Every structure is written in structure tokens, then in C-alpha cells.
Image (cartoon, grey):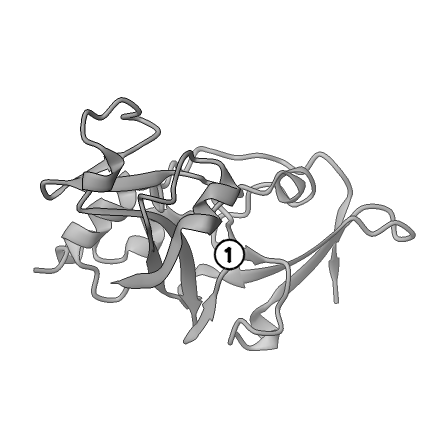
Amino acid sequence: MEISEKTKNIRDLYAFIEIDLNYRDVYAVIDGVEYNLRLWPELKTRWSEFDAMYYYDTAVVLNGVEVKSWDDGYYPENPMVLDYIGTRPGYIILSDDKHCGVPSDEILHMVGGHPKELLIDAYLIPRKYYDKVILYRHYLDSSLYFSSVEPSIYRAKTGRTYKIELDLNHPNPDLLQAMIRLGVCKKIDPTYHVSPLRTVRTVQ
């Protein structure tokens, strides 16, 4: 089942938020139910009895090329971007345009800070180039995992990964709802706006 035609263009309805190890949420599956261990720290089940244990990270596909690090112009997460670039509805914000698969004449290059002390270099990509949102589930060995601290997560990684793709041209509604729940897809508030606090200019 796909989302109805009325809501099919989810590029205009949702922002897509990067999550990774810095997000630090670890999940456990118990009897088929997924629990966030940060929200449910006192589960009565022993960790060794979990059906599965994992964390998530994300990527987006821009014009056929997978990109691991980005900011959605509606809700930039990077404080430097928010300071110098502000919110940029209609755009995806990258720090590098070399591997995004988008024609250079459609990329807006912006820099922030004094010309002698360049503090931010950003490339704005039109949202129409969003193809997919990818969720990677990285499985952990619960017997090696002792806290949500990052080194513990690295120590407990098994190397087993499961890839989940949300195709924005043919979105699966159940997968969309799962990504909303995990904070990967966020409903756009068109009234939300943050102006740049510092000098920003476009490079020709």
C-alpha cells in the first residue's frame, strides 16, 4: 500500500533528519516489541535475553548518490549552519558538493564569516533531488554492551547491518511512520524560520 495522491509528495511534507552514533539511542527487541533503552531504562528482562539489540544511523540518496551527512534546510541540526546559513526551506545543505550527484549549475554555494576567516562553507541542493531516506540498523552483542556510552557501542558491534529504504517517489506508509517515530522524518512547519546571525554570502 502506498500513500494517497493527496500526500504523495512527502518531500514537501517532511524534513529528513540525520541520526548517527551521536544520537546514542539504543534499541532492544523483547517478544517482538522494540524498546528505546533510554526511555525504558528499567526493563525487567536481562540484556542477554533480548531478541535483538541495535542502534540506527541514516543516509539520504540525492539524485542516485548516497550521502551520509547533510542538513535539511527546514530544520538544520548543525549549530554553525543555523548561525551562518539559517533555515533554507526548499534546500538540502551539504558541506561538500563533490559526491552528491547533482548538476553543479543547480547548486548554490554559500560561505559565512569574514573573507579572511572563512568559518563555514555550505552547498545548497534543491529538495527535488531527494530520492530516498535510508535507515541502517547496526546490531549489537548485548553481552558486550554495558551503557549508552559511545565506546561501549563500538565494542559491542557485531558487524551485522540491516538496510531499510524509504523511496520518496513511492513511499511505504508503514515505513514512513516508523521513521517519524525514530525522528528521521519530521513534519514540516512552514512558519518555522531562523535568520542567519552572521554574515553570509553567495559564491558565484
Closer-to-camera residue (89/27): 27
Closer-to-camera residue (18/86): 18
Closer-to-camera residue (51/131): 51
- Quadrant (top left/top right/bottom left/bottom right) for the C terminus: bottom right
Residue 174 placement, left or right of 123: left
Residue drawn where x is 31% and y is 26% of the image: 39
Number of numbered callouts drawn: 1
**Whether residue 156 is visible:** yes
Q: From the top left corner, tell me how far across and down residue 99 is, in percent.
A: 57, 74
Quickly name the residue at label 1: 92
Q: From the top left corner, tell me how far across and down residue 7 is, in percent.
A: 20, 52
CA neighbours of label 1 inside 10 A, class few (<14), some (14 to 19), many (20+): many
Residue drawn where x is 32% and y is 62% of the image: 161
- Quadrant (top left/top right/bottom left/bottom right) for the N terminus: bottom left
Give amino acid for label 1.
Ile
Q: Is residue 143 above or below residue 66?
A: above
**Whether residue 167 is visible:** no
Q: From the top left corner, tell me how far across and down residue 102 is, in percent.
A: 52, 74
